[in-house]
Image: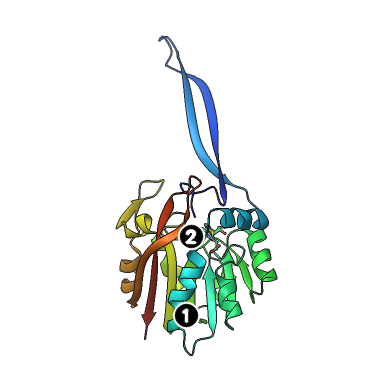
Amino acid sequence: MGPRCGLLTQVWYLKVWDFEIGSAGFKKQRVLAIVMGTCEWLDAPTYEKAAEKLVWQAPQVLFMNTLPHLEGYERIIDVGCGSGLSGGLFIDAGFVVDGIDKHAHMIDAALDRGYGRGFVTKVETGNARIVSLAGTYDCLISCGMFGDYVYVSALRSVLELLKQRAVVGIAGRAHDLAKRFRRSSNGNRQLQNLEDELEHNGFTILEHEIGVGHHSARGFPVPYVYVVAGRE
Ligand SMILES: C[S@@+](CC[C@H](N)C(=O)[O-])C[C@H]1O[C@@H](n2cnc3c(N)ncnc32)[C@H](O)[C@@H]1O
């Protein structure tokens, strides 16, 4: 869930800048600029309370769509695991789940929920501990992170954590994940289309569903895409 949809892990702020522009010899102009942005702030219990309020149903749909493809598989890595709402369903079904999240407080909550190992790192940058896990996992799940928080082009580095024969289950905002490219803040074009990226990495799309991920603060349904892909 991202900044536009529900304040789940972020809060909006308004900043007012008051400054003067103009060069020597010219009358200076006073300029007022209002800047809007977000900062991340929530702890895990507050996140979960908000998830309940906004009817965060993506973990359940992701679980139901991915589970039928996991026959004979055991180890799952949950990318952007948060407090473990998605991976927890797989743990309850008997899988071993590890998590990656950029927030230590989220990883702590996921470990409390039964995750085997937790790695505090940004998906885009990774770290040495994660690199050492290359080829370890049977399945990668990610719910509510790719698309609005993280460019799909960052998926490539975490796919390295999978064995050759593997399954991927990803849920994210349908609008974001259907775009072909997205511009980052430095103006570079980043590949954004989820299914293109998976196919480029040798996966075949097994399931594609458009459904509701959660509701907005005003009660409108927010469309999510649920994609399951497999590689032999
Ligand atoms: C909407 S929450 C979803 C959490 C969990 N997957 C769930 O289903 O409840 C998005 C999570 O992605 C994490 N996240 C956002 N950007 C990230 C990044 N660049 N690297 C790793 N984690 C990130 C956030 O800290 C947050 O826990």
Looking at the image, the residue that sits furthest to the bottom is 72
Asked if disc 1 and disc 2 are in contact, CB closer than 8 Å, the reply is no
Which of pointers 1 and 2 indicates the residue nearer the eye? 1
Q: Which residue is mark 2?
A: 145
Q: Is residue 201 visible?
A: no
Residue at 56% across, 51% down: 8
Provide residue 78's location: percent of width, then percent of height. Answer: 53, 71
Residue at 60% across, 72% down: 88
**Amino acid at the residue labelled 1:** Leu
Circle 1: element type: helix
Label 1 neighbour load within 10 Å: few <14, some 14-19, many 20+: some
Provide residue 177's location: percent of width, then percent of height. Answer: 36, 59
Provide residue 105's location: percent of width, then percent of height. Answer: 67, 59
Left or right, 75 with reference to 157:
right
**Amino acid at the residue labelled 2:** Met
Above or below — where is 170 with respect to 25? below
Residue 67 numbered tag: 1
